[in-house]
Amino acid sequence: MEMLRPGRTRIVNSLQAVVLILMLPVMLAACGGGAEAETQANSLPANTTSPDTTSPVVTISGPTSASSYSTSSATVALSGTASDSVGVTQVTWSNSRGGSGTASGTVSWNSGNITLQGGSNTLTVTARDAAGNTATDTLVITYSTSTPGDTTAPSVSITSPTSSATYTTASSTLSLGGSASDNVGVTQVTWSNSRGGSGTASGTTSWSVSGITLLGGSNTLTVTARDAAGNVNTDTLTVTYNAPDTTSPTVSITSPTSSAAYTTSSSTLSLGGTASDNVGVTQVTWSNSRGGSGTASGTTSWSVSGITLLGGSNTLTVTARDAAGNVNTDTLTVTYNAPVISNTAILTWDAVPATNLSGYRVYYGTTPGTYQQAPGQGLSVGNITTYTLMGLSNGTRYYFAVTAFDTAGNESGYSNEVFKDIP
């Protein structure tokens, strides 16, 4: 290495400068720099921090401090201690058959419940310090899924939707719930329906099943609890499913004809017929497309009398209804050939679209705007839109108007006025 001399300048990079400064006391000593240089070298601070290379110590002490353990329980909790020259920062666990996690605590730790698989499970506990040093301890646990000599059957109870032996519902599906217990442990709860369907419940000591399909009538639901030794016990619930009635009745018009059409010269007509239903007919009603409606007498054998017909086509509809609201209809188209009567005027008007409409009144007279009937005293013709006035005088012009009135008795103004000359 070249020595620095007074009066000579040497350019070095920052790294070389640092190295040179660090080596300067040594060089000065080597070049006879004397005691002062040696003293300066001895006065430099020394680095006394060394890395942590010491591993922690971890020990499993529960459920045993031995290297192996046997159990008939499906879960186990480990516990123990750990120490380190500086400090334990974390304790974790893993199972050779699957599963891992972090224990609670460090110097005194607990894993919580670890799930075991049948047979051998190697559980490894690892302690770690801040420098990343680790240490482990292991415990080999043999999980026996059957208990030799266990002949005690579990107990199982259905508590929902009822703890009784029978239940009635109008729903096509049902959910069950209940409890089960065993001297060793319940491993499974299953269900089956005598009308078809089966499955496994969710849970064991507290179990539930949802969406069991029912068929109309009686369904015997059996719930079975099983333990690891194969012992079983059952509880049953007989569920009666009253399926909703979706079948419509049948109805037939048989009088005055069973045909689809009929012609008459009478202004009124009587109907008769039959109706039937898988549960029962509750009502038979009728209506006329030209106006008028009502309820028939009887159900399975019914009749209607005095239906008013208007000249021309009248469509009569008969409706049968059951308790579930299902309906069915039959129709008869009746042509009424009204007799020709002299001295008559046939009035026709548009219907008033009011929900509280009660009917119409007809007013007439021989002078425009002046009628034989006082206001509110017109001829009440019912809820129809055609009316025939008879007995009018020959050789006279008549003027006509119509009003509508509601269920409260309120009456509208007059319609537009029309007239007819009676020859």
Image (cartoon, rainbow, N blue to C red):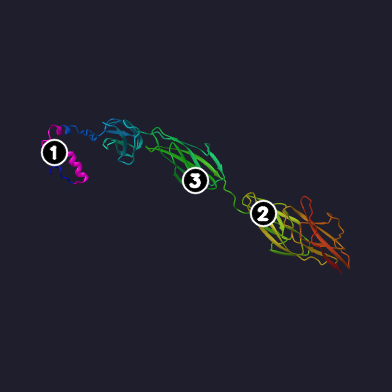
User: Is residue 310 shown left or right of residue 191?
Assistant: right
Residue 120 in which image quadrant: top left
Type of residue at label 2? Ala
Decide: is 210 above or below 148.
below
**Sequence order check: which comes first, mark 2 or mark 3?**
3
84 and 291: which one is in front?
84
Q: Which residue is the extreme one toward the front?
A: 7
Q: Amino acid at mark 3?
A: Gly
Camera-side mark, 2 or 3: 3
> Whole-percent x and y of residue 280?
64, 50
Which residue lies under the disc numbered 3?
Answer: 211
SS type, badge 2: strand
Question: At numbered mark 3, what does the secondary structure look like: helix, strand or loop?
Answer: strand
Quadrant in the picture for the C terminus: bottom right
Q: Which mark is residue 27?
A: 1
Total label count? Answer: 3
In the picture shown, does residue 261 fall above or below 151?
A: below
The residue sitting at 88% across, 65% down in the picture is 393
